Amino acid sequence: MVVAPPNPVRSEKPEPIELPVIDLSADRSEVSKLIVKACEQYGFFKAVHHGVSDDVIAAMEEEGLGFFTKPVCEKQRAGPAGPFGYGIKSIGFNGDSGEVEYLLLHTNPSSISQLSHTISDDPKKFSSAVSGYIEAVKRLACEILDLMAEGLGVHDPSLLSNMIRDVDSDSMFRLNRYPPSSFHTPPPPHRATTEIGFGEHTDPQMLTILRSNDVGGLQICVAGGTWVPVTPDPTAFCINVGDVLQAMTNGRFMSVRHRALTNGFKYRMSMAYFGAPPPHAWLSVPPELVTPHRPLLYRPFNWAEYKKASYSLRLGDSRLQLFLK
Ligand code: GA4
C-alpha cells in the first residue's frame, strides 16, 4: 500500500525560499548549466525573459477572471470535471479535496473549442485566448526541455521536447482560483489563517509551467520535509520537474512535492501548463544518462500506464516508486 506522508499546515512561518532565477535571454550554454543545476537541487526554478508576451498573458488572465467571477450555477455548466471541465473543491476521483475551484482543459484544439461553449458567452474569444496562451507556453516548455537536454549532454537535444511537440501529446492546462481563507473561517485578530487549497503532490507529467497573480500560496517541500513558501512573481514563470522527467533523466532531476495554501485575505489565481508525452510513446532514458555508477532506476513504461496509475491513487501518494526497476 502507498501511504501519503502527514500533511500539516504548520503555524510557524518559514522564510520564503529564493528559487534560482534564470534569465533565458543570457548565454545559451550558461543557461543550460544553470537549469540542470536547479533541477538537480530544487526541481524548481523561476524563468525570466521567457519570451511569452504580456498581451498573451493578460488575455488569458482576463478570461480566467471573467469565468471565476460568474455565479456558481453558471460555472457549473462546465462541470463536473471528469477530469476536464469545471471543478470545485473536489480533486481527482479518489476523495481528495481542497479550497480551490478550477478549470482543467486538454490542450488539443478540438477539446478547447468544445468546452469553451459551456465556459464562456463568447466562446471564440475564450478559445482564442486559451490557444494563444497554450501555444506560447508550449514553445517555452520545448525551449526549456532543449536546454535541459543540452545541459545534460544528451546526444539528441530534441529527444525530450519531441514528446510534447507530438500532435498526440497529452498536455493539459489548468486555471485555479483559491478563495481567501477568511471567507470560511474568520481569522483570529491580527493574523491570517491559511487552509489547504491544493494538497501536496508531485506533478505526473514532464514539465509544469506555472504562473500566478501576485498572491503567494505555493509551497515546496525541501530536504528534511520542511514546507517553504515561494515568493510570487507575476513577471516570471515558475518551472518544475514532473515525475516523467525524473524518470527520463534516470533520477538526475527531482520531481518535488508542492502544495498551494489559501491566502488570508486575497484571491489567488494560477495557470499551469502540464507538458506531457503522447499516451503510447516509450519513456526511454537517453543512453548518456545511464552509467555503471548510475544504473537504470525505473522499468520501461509509457505515459498511458503512468497516467492510469496516477488517477487510481490519491493526490499525495508517491507513484514513481511503483515503477522502480
Ligand atoms: C496533479 C497535477 C495536475 O493538476 C493534474 C492533477 C490531476 C487532477 O486534478 O485531475 C490529479 C493530480 C494531478 C495527481 C494525481 C491524480 C490526478 C488528481 C489526482 C488525484 C491535472 C494531473 O495531471 O495530476
Image (tube, rainbow, N blue to C red):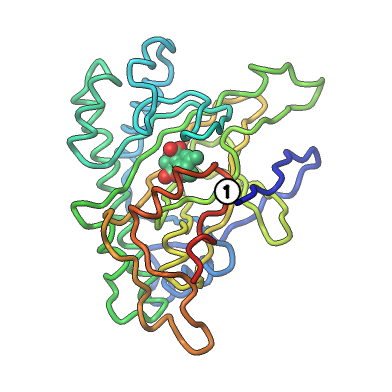
Question: 245 or 319, which is in the foreground?
Answer: 319
Which residue matches tag 1? 317
Tell me where residue 96 sits by quadrant: top right
Kindly tell me whether residue 211 is visible in this rendering. no
Q: Is mark 1 within 8 Å of ligand 1?
A: yes
Q: Is residue 281 left or right of residue 79?
A: left
Give the amino acid at mark 1: Asp
Q: Position of residue 244 (x, y in %)?
A: 42, 60
Q: Name above or below for residue 116 compared with residue 32.
A: above
Q: Residue at x 38, y 69 (%)?
A: 300
Question: 62 or 297, which is in the foreground?
Answer: 297
Q: Position of residue 89 (x, y in %)?
A: 53, 25
Q: Position of residue 117 (x, y in %)?
A: 23, 21
Kindly tell me whether residue 63 is visible in this rendering. yes
- Give the number of marks: 1
Q: Residue at x 32, y 68 (%)?
A: 146
Task: Tell me if mark 1 has few (under 14), some (14-19) or many (20+) residues whose alpha carbon lies within 10 angstroms of its own.
Answer: some
Q: Residue at x 73, y 40 (%)?
A: 8
Q: Name above or below for residue 82 compared with residue 19.
A: above
Q: Is residue 228 left or right of residue 301?
A: right
